[in-house]
C-alpha cells in the first residue's frame, strides 16, 4: 500500500458521524425528488438506503457524493462541507457508469489510481478485487460481475475512508452477488464507512448495521435492521400455497395478502389464527411460519403496488 | 430434383404472400426506427433550434457574400493614396478589384506573395509590377496591356513566391483546424454521454486539468500529422522553407493549442451531437473564409479584415507564411504567437468555467 492517509478509528471505538446530512431537498420542476432527508453515518459503519424505484435514493446519494447540488440542505463530511478532502477520501461506485474505451483492466485501474495522491497500489487493487487474471483484458470484454469488480477496484483506488455503493449488485447472478458481498464484507473488516443503496433486502440485512427506508423522497423508517423489525413487526408471518387455499377462507378476518403463488397472513395471535384456519378447513400441510424479514417490513412500509 | 418434384415441395402460391409479409415487416421495423429517431431529434430542442437556425444563417451569409454585383476575379493594387477611376482607363474594367496602395514596398511584398495579382502606378507612361509565377498575374497583365499598350513592366526585385507556396501553409492550417476542432470536440461529447465524465467528476480531477490533458493529447497527434503532411507535400511540390523550421514548429504548437481550446469551448457544455457538430462547423467556416487559407483579404472591407484578425487560424497562417515565405525571425511574429498563447489561455479558462461533467 502506498502513502495511506491517517487510519480511521477502529469499529469498536466510540462512533462519530463521518457523514452528516441535514434537511436535504432536491426539486426538479414540480417534482420533489428528495424531501427533507436528514441522517448521520458513523465512521466504520455500513449504512443501507432502501426504497422502491423512484423513492429518491439515487438522487440522495448523488447529492451526498457531491455530484448533484441540493435545492436545500447540506452535507457535511468530517464536520465540513464537501470539498477537496472529501473528493480525495471518497470512493464511489455509481449505479450506471462508463469507463474509457480501449483500455485494459489494469490500465483502467491505473488511470483512476493516478488521479489520487494516496491509495492502494494497482497490483493490490487487482488482487483485492480478484482481477489479476483479467488484468490484460479489454475493459469492454468482461462479464457483468467482472465489470462490477473492476468498478469496485476503481472506487477503492484511493483507499477511501467512505465508500458509496449505489445498487452495486443489481443485475448480477447469485454467484457474482455473493462474491460482491464478500468484497463489501472485506471492506467493512478494514473499518471503511459504507453507504449502500440496494433493492435486495437480503443484502441490506446481511451487510448493513443501520438502514433507512425511503419513499417519496422522505425517510420513513431508520434504525438497525433487527431493531426496526422489532419496532414495526412484533408479529409472525404464515405462508400457504395459493392453490390449496379455499376461496371461502379468503373472507376470514385476517390480515391476508395474495401473492402469485402463495397466501401470506400476518398475525400477532398465532394460536387464534391457526384455529380460524382449521375451522375454515384450510389444509395446513404446507404451512410455513416464519418471523418477518426486512423485505416484509419494506413492503409493509412502502406498499405492494408496482412502482415505476 | 425434377421440376415436378420441386413444385410438390414448394406450393406455388406460398412465396408471394410470404414475401409481401416480409416486406411489410421490414417496412414496419424501418418505420419504428424512423419514428423513434424523429422523436429523439424533435425532443432535443437545442439541436432542433440549431438545425433550423443554420439554413437561416446560411441564407443570410450567402446573400451577404454573393448578393449584389458579381464578385471580382482579380485583385490589382493601384499605387495611390486615393483611388479614382479617371486615373486610368484600365480602372474601368469589370471583375477587377482595384485596391489603393499608398506604399510601394508593402504593395510589392503583396505582389511577390500573390496577395495582389498586379500592381500599377498610373502615369505617363503607366508602370506595373507582376509576379512572373502568378497565373492570375499573367491574365491581369494581358488585360492591362489591351487597355494601355504603352504600359511598362518593371521587374519585381527579390524572390517571388509561387501561388502553391503561398497556398501550402493554408492547406496545412486548414487540416490542423479540422483536426483540432472536431478531434477533441466529439471525444469530450462521447465521454459526457457515456457517463465517463460523471465518474471522473467523483475524483479530485478538475475541469481545467481534464481539458488540458485533452488538449495536450490532441496536440501530439495534430503535430505528428502536420509534420507528415509538411514533409510529404513539401517534397512533392518542392517547397522551400525560407525561415527556421523550429520557428514553424513553434507556430504549429501554439496554433494547435489555440484551435483545440477553441473547439473545447463548444464541447465543454453540450451533450447533443447535432448541436456540437453544428457549432463546430460554425467556428470552422468563418476561418475557412476569413483566415486567408485560399485567398488574401487584401482589399476586403475593413470590418471583414478585423473579423478575420479575431480568428486564431489567421494568426497561424500569418506567422507561418512570414516564416516560411519571408524568412521572418521570432521577433517579427511575436504578435501572432502572443495572440495564439493568449487565446489558448482564454478559451481553456472559459471551457473549464463552463464545463459540464454530466448530461443535465
Image (spheres, rainbow, N blue to C red):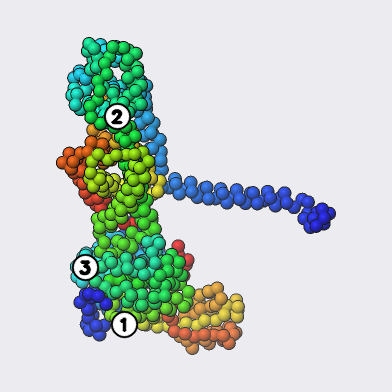
Q: Residues within 10 Å of mark 2 (few under 14, many from 20)?
A: many
What percent of the width, then of the height, locates residue A2? 25, 75
Question: Residue B306 vs residue A251: left or right?
Answer: left
What percent of the width, then of the height, locates residue B234? 34, 42
Q: Are marks 1 and 3 on the same chain?
A: yes
Say if mark 1 contacts mark 2, CB within 8 Å: no
Q: CA distance from mark 3 to mark 2?
A: 60 Å
Write down the residue under mark 2: B114
Say if mark 3 contacts mark 2, CB within 8 Å: no
Query: In which image quadrant can residue A164 be found?
Result: bottom left
Q: Secondary structure at mark 3?
A: helix
- Residue A47: assigned label: none
What percent of the width, then of the height, locates residue B274? 40, 46
Q: Nearer the viewer, residue A214 or A48?
A: A48
Residue depicted at x 48% and y 74%? A173
Image vertical order of residue B67 relative to residue A218, above or below: above
Residue depicted at x 23% and y 29%? B158
In this view, the mark in front (1 or 2) = 2
Q: Secondary structure at mark 2?
A: loop
Furthest residue to the right?
B4
Write down the residue under mark 3: A85
Q: Nearer the viewer, residue B45 or A84?
A: A84
Which chain does tag 3 point to? A
First in residue order: circle 1 vs circle 3: 3
Which chain does tag 2 point to? B
Quadrant of the drawing holding the C terminus of chain B: bottom left
Residue depicted at x 35% and y 66%? A108
Image vertical order of residue A248 relative to residue B215, above or below: below
Write down the residue under mark 1: A189
Q: Secondary structure at mark 1?
A: helix
Amino acid at each position: 500500500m502506498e502513502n495511506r492517509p491517517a487510519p480511521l478509528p477502529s469499529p469498536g471505538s466510540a462512533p462519530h458521524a463521518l457523514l452528516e446530512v441535514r434537511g436535504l431537498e432536491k426539486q426538479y420542476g414540480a417534482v420533489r425528488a428528495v424531501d427533507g432527508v436528514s441522517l448521520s453515518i458513523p465512521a466504520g459503519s455500513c449504512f443501507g438506503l432502501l426504497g422502491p424505484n423512484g423513492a429518491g435514493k439515487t438522487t440522495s446519494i448523488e447529492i451526498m457524493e457531491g455530484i448533484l447540488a441540493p435545492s436545500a440542505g447540506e452535507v457535511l463530511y468530517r464536520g465540513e462541507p464537501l470539498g477537496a478532502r472529501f473528493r480525495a477520501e471518497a470512493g464511489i461506485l455509481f449505479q450506471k457508469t462508463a469507463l474509457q474505451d480501449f483500455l485494459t483492466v489494469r490500465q483502467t485501474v491505473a488511470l483512476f489510481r493516478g488521479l489520487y495522491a494516496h491509495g492502494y497500489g494497482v497490483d493490490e487493487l487487482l488482487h483485492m478485487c480478484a482481477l489479476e487474471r483479467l488484468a490484460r483484458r479489454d475493459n469492454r470484454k468482461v462479464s457483468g460481475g467482472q465489470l462490477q469488480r473492476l468498478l469496485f477496484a476503481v472506487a477503492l483506488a484511493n483507499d477511501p475512508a467512505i465508500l458509496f455503493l449505489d445498487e452495486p449488485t443489481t443485475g448480477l447472478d447469485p454467484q457474482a452477488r455473493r462474491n460482491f458481498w464478500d468484497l463489501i464484507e472485506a471492506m467493512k473488516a478494514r473499518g471503511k464507512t459504507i453507504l449502500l443503496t440496494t433493492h435486495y433486502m437480503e443484502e441490506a440485512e446481511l451487510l448493513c448495521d443501520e438502514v433507512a427506508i425511503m419513499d417519496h423522497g422522505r425517510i420513513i423508517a431508520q434504525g438497525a435492521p433487527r431493531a426496526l423489525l422489532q419496532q414495526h413487526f412484533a408479529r409472525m408471518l404464515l405462508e400457504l400455497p395459493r392453490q390449496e387455499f379455499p376461496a371461502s377462507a379468503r373472507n376470514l378476518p385476517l390480515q391476508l395478502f395474495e401473492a402469485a403463488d402463495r397466501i401470506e397472513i400476518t398475525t400477532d395471535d398465532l394460536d387464534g389464527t391457526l384455529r380460524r384456519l382449521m375451522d375454515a378447513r384450510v389444509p395446513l400441510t404446507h404451512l410455513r411460519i416464519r418471523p418477518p424479514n426486512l423485505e416484509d417490513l419494506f413492503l409493509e412500509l412502502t406498499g405492494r403496488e408496482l412502482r415505476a | 430434383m425434377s421440376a415436378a418434384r420441386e413444385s410438390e415441395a414448394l406450393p406455388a402460391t406460398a412465396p408471394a404472400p410470404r414475401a409481401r409479409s416480409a416486406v411489410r415487416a421490414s417496412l414496419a421495423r424501418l418505420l419504428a426506427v424512423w419514428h423513434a429517431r424523429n422523436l429523439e431529434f424533435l425532443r432535443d430542442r437545442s439541436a432542433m433550434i440549431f438545425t433550423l437556425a443554420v439554413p437561416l444563417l446560411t441564407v443570410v451569409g450567402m446573400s451577404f457574400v454573393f448578393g449584389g454585383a458579381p464578385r471580382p476575379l482579380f485583385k490589382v493594387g493601384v499605387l495611390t493614396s486615393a483611388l479614382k477611376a479617371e486615373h486610368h482607363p484600365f480602372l474601368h474594367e469589370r471583375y477587377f478589384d482595384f485596391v489603393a496602395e499608398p506604399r510601394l514596398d508593402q504593395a510589392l511584398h503583396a505582389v511577390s506573395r500573390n496577395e495582389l495579382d498586379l500592381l500599377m502606378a498610373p502615369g505617363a507612361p503607366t508602370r506595373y509590377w507582376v509576379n512572373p509565377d502568378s497565373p492570375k498575374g499573367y491574365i491581369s497583365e494581358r488585360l492591362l496591356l489591351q487597355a494601355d499598350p504603352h504600359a511598362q513592366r518593371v521587374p519585381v526585385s527579390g524572390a517571388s513566391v509561387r501561388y502553391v507556396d503561398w497556398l501550402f501553409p493554408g492547406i496545412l492550417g486548414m487540416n490542423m483546424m479540422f483536426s483540432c476542432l472536431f478531434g477533441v470536440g466529439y471525444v469530450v461529447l462521447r465521454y459526457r454521454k457515456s457517463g465517463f465524465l460523471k465518474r471522473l467528476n467523483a475524483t479530485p480531477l478538475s475541469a481545467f486539468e481534464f481539458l488540458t490533458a485533452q488538449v495536450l493529447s490532441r496536440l501530439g497527434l495534430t503535430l505528428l500529422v502536420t509534420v507528415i503532411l509538411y514533409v510529404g507535400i513539401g517534397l512533392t511540390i518542392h517547397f522551400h522553407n525560407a525561415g527556421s523550421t523550429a520557428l514553424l514548429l513553434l507556430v504549429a504548437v501554439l496554433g494547435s493549442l489555440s484551435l483545440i481550446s477553441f473547439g473545447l469551448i463548444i464541447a465543454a457544455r453540450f451533450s447533443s451531437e447535432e448541436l456540437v457538430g453544428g457549432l463546430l462547423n460554425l467556428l470552422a467556416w468563418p476561418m475557412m473564409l476569413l483566415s486567408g487559407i485560399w485567398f488574401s483579404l487584401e482589399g476586403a472591407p475593413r470590418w471583414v479584415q478585423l473579423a478575420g484578425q479575431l480568428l486564431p487560424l489567421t494568426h497561424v497562417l500569418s506567422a507561418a507564411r512570414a516564416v516560411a515565405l519571408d524568412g521572418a525571425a521570432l521577433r517579427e511574429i511575436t504578435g501572432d504567437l502572443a495572440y495564439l498563447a493568449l487565446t489558448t489561455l482564454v478559451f481553456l479558462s472559459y471551457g473549464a468555467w463552463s464545463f459540464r461533467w454530466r448530461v443535465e
